[in-house]
Structure formats: structure tokens, C-alpha cells
Amino acid sequence: MAAKIDLRNSRMHDRQALDAIYAHVQPLLGQGRVADYIPELAHVPREQFGMAIVKLDGEVLQVGAAEQRFSIQSISKLFALVLALQSEGEALWQRVGREPSGTPFNSLVQLEAEGGKPRNPFINAGALVVTDVLCSRFATPENALVGLMRRLSGNAALDYNLKVAQSERRHSDRNAAMAHFIASFGRLANPVDRVLDAYCSQCSIEMNCVELARAALLLAQHGSVPHSGERLLTPSLAKRISALMLTCGTYDAAGDFAFRVGLPAKSGVGGGIVALIPGRCGICVWSPGLDETGNSLAGTAALEMFTTLTERSIF
């Protein structure tokens, strides 16, 4: 059980909250299971935790292993969606829906009943359609996504991990089944193998909490990059992406996550969760031990504690 914190105290500042959270989650570290269905991730130690807050003015607050890089996995779907919306705009929603799925992120059950149109871009089926869009737009879509992450994080050395990408690709039977099924409805424009290669590469991008929290400022700043002033999205599209994060960003636990945390967020089975407070900051937390829905166990607890202690959420 996590250590108890007295919630009768007045609202904490961010630095105080991070220190309290770090103590609070210690009993949770080592619990849960890592994403061992990807062999390269099977040996990541569960007893790790990092958290970072990056504010719009550039201030960085961090605790624990906030500079330890990890495989961002499904967090990449968020930024792939940014690239796809830049290309397609609102027309993208003709190919992928905007509703919570209520099923696991790698489920096939809804595709047949719904004519091969995925429920949302954050489940695997929807991410494959988004990746197909990027394959049509870019000669090497995985490099395009790495380029975006370098711009948003301010780190020109970011890259994907080839060993993780190859490991994930060798064990992608379920994703391959989904991609072929979507293609059977005429909803993929590119060869399945090309889409799968790009998808597995983008999931293997390695970043740390500080870099991901800084990347999330794109949405906290309503579509512009704070450190450069570059506008990548209209405020309307940025709003829509944040709404999808809230309703669909944490797999089939999105409702409970919104109830507990109250922030737009996107998780990945590498143990990361990136979140944001609009107009204020980006947040990232990482701990590899996952709960039964594939979200970081300690990470979810940390974000819940953060919004409780600081009294800041979108509600």
C-alpha cells in the first residue's frame, strides 16, 4: 500500500507536490508487470520512477529518474495524430472515429461490426490507420515522427531503438491481423508490411520524462511550440486532440483515469504517461510496472496525487 498523505493541508506548490508524490509511490514500485510480450522490454526493471513538469515559461521541475530514457510506445500515437491532422485536417475522421472503445487497445472485436473503421486513433487499430496516412504522406514516416519529437523536445539527438522496433515487429501478429482486417474493408492505402514497419518503429522512440513533458507543451499552448513560437496546429485541432486524450488516451481505463486524475493524458506500455494542464504545463511520469489495463500503476497514482495535492485539473 502507498504511504498516506494528509490531504487536510492547504494546496501544495508543484515542487512540494513532486516530493510528496515521490515518497507516496515508493511502495508501488516493483508492482505490476512490464510489457513482456515485447521481448526487448521484458527485462526493464520495474522499480523505477520519474516525473517531470515543464511549464510554458520553460521552468522544469523533476524528481526521480526523470532523465532516464524509455520506450514511449503508444505515446507515439499522440504525436502521429498531430502529423496526420496537419496533413488531413478534419477529413481524417472519415477514416477513424472519435469514440472510446471500451475494449482493450489491441482488440479486434469492433472492427467487423463497424466496417473496419477503428473507434479512435489511440487504440492499435486506429493508430494503424493514422500510420497509413503518414505512409502516404512521407517516404519514411518513422523518421518524420522522430523529426517532430526532436523539434518539440528541443533534443536533436532523439531516435528510435532499432532493437525494440525489430523485437516488436517480430511479435506483431495481432497488429498484423488488425491491419489485414482493416485492409480487407479497403481502409488501408499502403501495403500492410509497410504500415507495420513504420508503426513498430514509431513505438520504439526513446525519450525521457522531461523531453515528453516539453513535447506536450504543443497542446498546452493550444497548437504552438512555446520555445520557438511555431504554430503546428490550429487551436481548434489542438482542442480536439486534448479532448481525445481525455476520453480515449488511457486505453479502456479512460473513464476511471478521467475520474481519478482529471487531465488529458496519453499512456504507453513502456510505462510512460504524458499529460497536460491547458495554458500551464506539460507533465510526464514514468514507471514500467503496468496495471491490468496497460497503464503505469505508479504513474497513474502519481498523477492522481498531483491533481489532488495541487488542486489543479481541468475540472
Image (cartoon, helix red, strand yellow):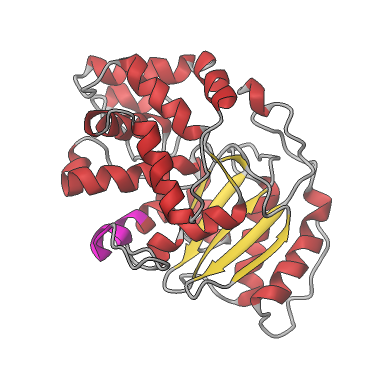
Magenta extent: 233-241
Image location (x, y in percent) of residue 257: 54, 54
Residue 17 position in % (x across, y down): 70, 72
Q: Main secondary structure of the magenta part?
A: helix
Is 18 situated left or right of 140 in this image? right
Q: At 49% across and 38% down in the image, what residue appears?
A: 74
**Magenta stretch: residue 65 in it?**
no
In the rendered image, residue 240 lying in the magenta stretch gets the answer yes
Q: Is residue 107 left or right of residue 20?
A: left
Q: In front: 151, or 172?
A: 151
Pinpoint residue 15: horizontal percent, then vertical percent: 69, 74
Name the residue located 39 percent from the left edge and 34 percent from the top edge: 143
| Quadrant hosting residue 126 | top left
* Horizontal and vertical percent position of residue 119: 32, 37
**Nearer the observer, 234 or 207:** 207
298 up-or-down from 8: above or below: above
Q: Is residue 30 above or below residue 52?
A: above
Tell which residue pokes out farthest to the bottom in this image. Answer: 10
- Asked whether, in this view, residue 84 is left or right of residue 258, the answer is left
Number of marks in the rendered image: 0
